């Protein structure tokens, strides 16, 4: 009996001692865990880029507050400037692509290592016009005409342009002759285009010889120019004959305008009006704003366009508003003060009533010179 009790007591002591040792070992393991090897330090430039990306995402999130169908739309606080909000809508940052997922999905749906879909150009232009500038498709080949001609004209005012160098499947007309017959004012008729920018009929006209004479009298060289909304590139073609290089921004709205510019031996830029000009600061001698720049552009977008013109113009360069039209009251109250903000010298400022207008619309032709110093 005594032996049994002694044995039980010994087993109890051994069990308690074992538990105490286990607890001690466990606590020491928790207190002094094995430290993993320290990772390599992140380079400072990567940290700076990460901080910039986070700040940009946070900024765009504030500018585009999310809404829920079960709640009322979130209103932006009054502390955010309205012009900054508009700039976020006009900006080519990917937020504009986020607002049009259906178009973006169609644009990015293609079979790798084959031809790009036939509607590639249409989808890309639809996205660009909405402020979304998607990255080029990878691993698909752009379609080209089956039998293009290699004998391309060097004269920008050739009697005709080769139809076989254009993909016509997305247009109603299937030839340049069809476009000429449908509307001679579209810019595809060489006879009509030859006479443009060379004649003077009223105060609204500014013939190119007169423009060159004005620049020469002011000792201001004209070598490089940008034609905003230049259609088929007639102004660039005429200036080419005077040894002045002009690039043309144009869109393929209903016709192959970019192809026509290129076939005339000129440089087309597939750029909408709300995009920043792909030109460096202060390098242009002349910027012409043609028929596309008119009163249907929102006022704030018009202001951004004018200030981007100021960005690319060199000191002493010229801004030419060619037949800008608007309502007469809007020209006096809105557009003239907006243009006046630039502080440019008025070399020419002529207005005239738009014929057959029922809304009191007027034309403005203005040649403005950027100051040498501000």
Image: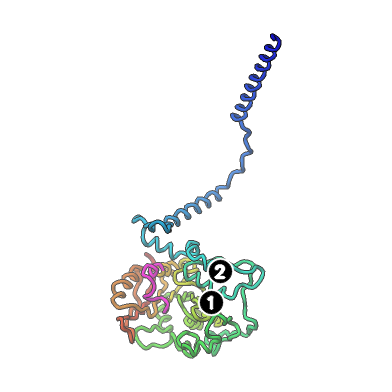
Magenta run includes residue 257? no
Q: Is residue 255 left or right of residue 138?
A: left
- Label 2 sits on a secondary structure element that is helix
Q: Residues within 10 Å of mark 1 (few under 14, many from 20)?
A: some
Pointer 2 and pointer 1: residues touching (CB < 8 Å)? Answer: no
Residue ID at (60%, 82%): 165
Residue 106 position in % (x across, y down): 56, 69
- Residue 127 location in percent, x, y? 50, 69
Task: Mark 2: give few (<14), some (14-19) or many (20+) Cα within 10 Å.
Answer: some
> Residue 106: which numbered mark, if any?
2
In the rendered image of this protein, does residue 175 appear above or below residue 2? below
Picture layout, residue 113 above or below residue 182 = above
Q: Which quadrant would residue 344 be assigned to in this image?
A: bottom left
Q: Is residue 297 magenta?
A: yes
Residue closest to the far right: 3
The magenta region covers 291-304
Against 101, is 77 above or below?
A: above
Left/right of residue 111 with respect to residue 72 in the rendered view? right
Find residue 62 and report its image quarter: bottom left
Residue 63 showing in the rendered view: no
Q: Which residue is nearer to you in this view: 187 or 130?
A: 130
Which mark is nearer the camera, 2 or 1? 2
Q: Which residue is mark 1?
A: 267
Distance in Å between CA atoms under marks 2 and 1? 29 Å
Say above or below: 91 vs 351.
above
* Residue displayed at 44% across by 69% down: 274
The quadrant of the image that shows the C terminus is: bottom left
Of callouts 2 and 1, which one flags the residue occurring earlier in the amino acid sequence? 2
Q: Position of residue 311 (x, y in %)?
A: 43, 66
Q: Is residue 253 visible?
A: yes
* Foreground residue among 180 and 172: 172
């Amino acid at each position: 009996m005594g032996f049994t009790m002694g044995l039980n007591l010994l087993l109890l002591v051994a069990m308690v001692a074992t538990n105490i040792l286990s607890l001690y070992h466990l606590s020491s393991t928790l207190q002094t865990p094995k430290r993993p090897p320290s990772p390599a330090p992140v380079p400072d430039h990567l940290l700076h880029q990460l901080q910039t990306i986070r700040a940009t995402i946070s900024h765009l999130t504030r500018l585009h507050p999310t809404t829920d169908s079960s709640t009322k739309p979130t209103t932006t606080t009054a502390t955010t400037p309205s012009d900054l909000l508009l700039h976020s809508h006009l900006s080519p940052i990917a937020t504009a692509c986020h607002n049009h997922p259906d178009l973006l999905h169609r644009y990015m749906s293609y079979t790798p290592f084959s031809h790009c879909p036939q509607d590639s150009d249409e989808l890309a232009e639809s996205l660009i016009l909405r402020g979304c500038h998607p990255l080029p498709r990878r691993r698909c080949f752009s379609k080209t005409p089956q039998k293009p001609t290699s004998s391309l004209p060097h004269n920008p005012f050739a009697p005709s342009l080769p139809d076989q160098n254009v993909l016509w499947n997305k247009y109603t007309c299937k030839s340049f002759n069809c476009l000429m017959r449908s509307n001679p004012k579209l810019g595809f008729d060489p006879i009509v285009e030859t006479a443009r920018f060379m004649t003077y009929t009223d105060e609204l006209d500014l013939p190119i010889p007169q423009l060159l004479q004005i620049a020469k009298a002011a000792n201001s060289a004209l070598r490089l120019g940008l034609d905003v909304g230049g259609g088929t590139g007639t102004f660039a073609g005429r200036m080419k004959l005077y040894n002045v290089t002009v690039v043309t921004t144009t869109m393929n709205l209903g016709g192959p305008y970019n192809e026509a510019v290129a076939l005339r031996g000129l440089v087309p830029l597939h750029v909408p009006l709300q995009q920043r000009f792909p030109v460096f600061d202060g390098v242009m001698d002349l910027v012409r704003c043609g028929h596309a720049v008119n009163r249907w552009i929102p006022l704030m977008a018009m202001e951004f366009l004018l200030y981007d013109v100021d960005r690319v113009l060199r000191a002493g360069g010229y801004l030419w508003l060619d037949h800008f039209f608007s309502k007469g009251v809007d020209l006096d109250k809105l557009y003239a003060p907006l243009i006046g903000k630039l502080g440019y010298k008025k070399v020419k400022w002529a207005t005239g009533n738009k014929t057959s207008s029922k809304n009191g619309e007027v034309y403005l032709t203005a040649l403005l010179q950027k100051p040498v110093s501000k």
